[in-house]
Amino acid sequence: MKASDAIVKSLLNEGVDMVFGYPGAAVIDLYESLRKSKIHHVLVRQEQAAAHSASGYARVSGKVGVCIATSGPGATNLITGIATAYMDSIPLAVITGQVKSAMIGRDVFQEADITGATESFTKHSYLVKNANDLPIIIKEAFYIASTGRPGPVLIDIPSDIQAATLDKYIQPETVDIRGYKPTLKGHIGQIKRAVKAISESKRPLIVAGGGVLLTRAQNELISFINKSGIPVVHTLMGKGAIPTQNPYYVGMIGTHGFPQANRAMAKSDLLIFIGARIADRAWGGFGDKMLENVRVIHIDIDPAEIGKNLGSHIPVVGDAKHILSEMTSKIESLDTKDWVEELKTYKKTIQHADSEFVNPRYAVGLLSRKLDDDAILVADVGQNQLWAARNFEDKDGRCFLTSGGLGTMGYSLPAAVGAKFAAPGRQVAAVVGDGGFQMSQHELGTISANNLKIVILLFNNSRLGMVRELQDRNFGRITAVELDRNPDFIRLCDAYGIKGIRVTNNSALEAAFDLALKNKGPFLVECVVDCNESTL
Amino acid sequence: MNRHVLSVLVENQSGVLSRVSGLFSRRGYNIDSLSVGETEDPKVSRMTIVVKGDDYILEQIKKQLNKLIDVIKIVELNSEQSVFRELALIKVKTSMETRASIIEIVSIFRANIVDVANDTLTVEMTGDESKIEAFINLMDSYGIVEIVRTGLAAIERGNRQILNQKKYEED
Ligand SMILES: Cc1ncc(C[n+]2csc(CCOP(=O)(O)OP(=O)(O)O)c2C)c(N)n1
């Protein structure tokens, strides 16, 4: 069997039916094999988008996202997307072409050491040296990407190897990597200690992170809360772990979180972190001092996260889904009525005064009310990310995607593409600033070519808003953040055959969203936002 | 900042050394020495890594190393229950007057002279680090031309084997 056919066969064996990519000379054989197969290839307009789309696809489908690029510039263009997926623990199989085996190391045309370049932000990588290894390498790559703490795995395949012939295609049945045995089941002794600490606490608080969503443990979390009566806050990546309307929902923590959620953290006597690594943005204002008065249970599948950013009294290593159901079976109902009541009194409703601009918080809130109960919202990075995170209502079945770890501008459009391909029947909206939009505006091509029904909510404040705000606050002056000569986004979309409408005040929003949601294809809602609008 | 000796079994594959050493520089861990070579199983290499760090750093180093797919096992070796050895090649300036006294010191240290030239001697010596340091200090006064050191190699005393030991665990 030809090696490139073997690659495709291995992908099919892993259940792959869709890949995102961009061809080139070093993957010419692979593309010919793909053409003959039933795998659907989505041609993006820049390789970074292939990785982001694969990430959006993975997050919505629960499968490993696959992206493909050619050697050299194709591979290096993927880098930001790979790093973005790594920081958010998204399972990707990244396939790159490489120059001919015999040429490696000679700096020949379109050679780049991509395994070397991505070493620190791939979970693992392979440089294939023998075509006969392909079936096992691909099997291992998918296994590594999707088990334990998920992450991107890169497979770099020289072009001569793709063109080679396998002695025999042997489908490996199982994977056995002696250095990789992720702990899934929590240690029963630790779980018991955790349950005991919880039953002794007066003001326990769950801090849900992205790990809850990655293991799809939302139901287990709800069962645990319902039985124990413990209120919940979440990190940016944990948004969606429990519905906003749940009586135990408190809010998002961190530097851009809600005051009531951060206050709950400060008042708690037992913090139960679940699948959260508690990096600076989430821990932000709390400082080490806070830990003096609180006990900490830290549940995480990655032992290296335990004790890295935060000391913990009771670490439990394992899969959140498994540990939550174990804890639910052991926990007794706690009397948390006063504690939950106390947290509720903090909640305040936000007023939106009408003005000559669109209020972005109001816009996200309104869109959230109009969207279906299983809609997917993809937020970019910047002020728009936080307007979206703070005002999009989480519901059971909804999905909120964003680049939380790396904070990669330009994520939302391509990730929305992947999300839409993963769930064609669900509504998908992308929230983005005028800066981030222009970082990925080439993906209007992909959106248009595939007639993807995505609502693009563009907040045009003619600024790199979040940086503008930071400069203002730190120096009282701004520099290099003005985007006053922005293109006419409506006409730009029109050039791609994408309809759109420009909205300049709150009262026109409702009609615009109705139009957008009724439209059969993609639709841009451009909101004109005050250039001095603040994040919070 | 204590000194720790880690013995690490890894898959004998290209890229492993880069992954391990990259991890140290990237995360800002201090590495004193790293030596690596094939083991009794040709598919497995063994690294001896000497690091400096407090308990937090050491814990992180072990955990981060463990995350590498190619790392099979990590054991920390303590000096009482292990043999620590390093090999050093030391080229020293000599003259008619100094040669005899250098040779005398070499024999006291049970080192070997592996090369003799008109104006230099090259000494091969094995020992733990303190022995090598002591020898180098003595040679300093004669004039050291070059030093090459392999870094520490370490193995546990008695019948203990790294593969039979409990895998490093976090809790
Ligand atoms: C790729 C990348 N480059 C730079 C940054 C730094 N950065 C963070 S937010 C921001 C401004 C984003 O502006 P815009 O997309 O218009 O969104 P807004 O903040 O105005 O909502 C910048 C430049 C980043 N996060 N990602």
Image (spheres, rainbow, N blue to C red):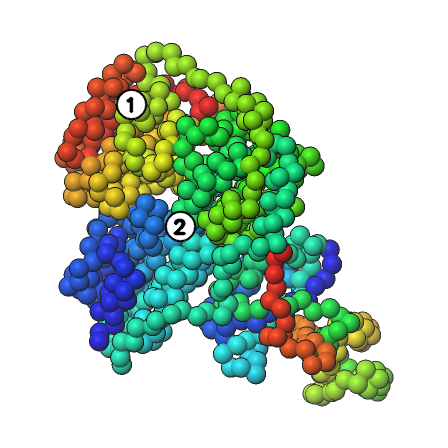
Tell me the subunit letter for badge 2.
Answer: A
Mark 2 surroundings within 10 Å by alpha-carbon count, few (fewer than 14), some (14 through 19), many (20 or more): many
Of badges 2 and 1, nearer the viewer stands: 2
Circle 1 is placed at which residue position? A527
Q: Secondary structure at mark 2?
A: loop
Where's the N terminus of chain A, which quadrant?
Answer: bottom left
The answer to whether the residue bearing label 2 lies less than 8 angstroms from the nearest atom of ligand 1 is: no
Do the residues at discs 2 and 1 belong to one chain? Answer: yes
Tell me the subunit letter for badge 1.
Answer: A
The x, y position of residue A360, in whole percent, is: 36, 22
- Left-right relation of B105 to A237: right
| Along the line of sight, the residue nearer the viewer: B57 or A91 | A91
Query: Of label 2 and label 1, which has the lower sequence position?
Result: 2
Q: Residue A516 — which label?
A: none
The x, y position of residue A385, in whole percent, is: 39, 32
Give, as a three-letter code, the residue at label 2. Answer: Ile
The x, y position of residue B167, in whole percent, is: 60, 67
Q: Is residue A359 above or below residue A102?
A: above
Give, as a three-letter code, the residue at label 1. Answer: Cys
Q: Residue at x 34, y 25 (%)?
A: A364
Circle 2 is placed at which residue position? A90
Q: Is residue A279 above or below residue A395?
A: below
| Along the line of sight, the residue nearer the viewer: A433 or A231 | A231
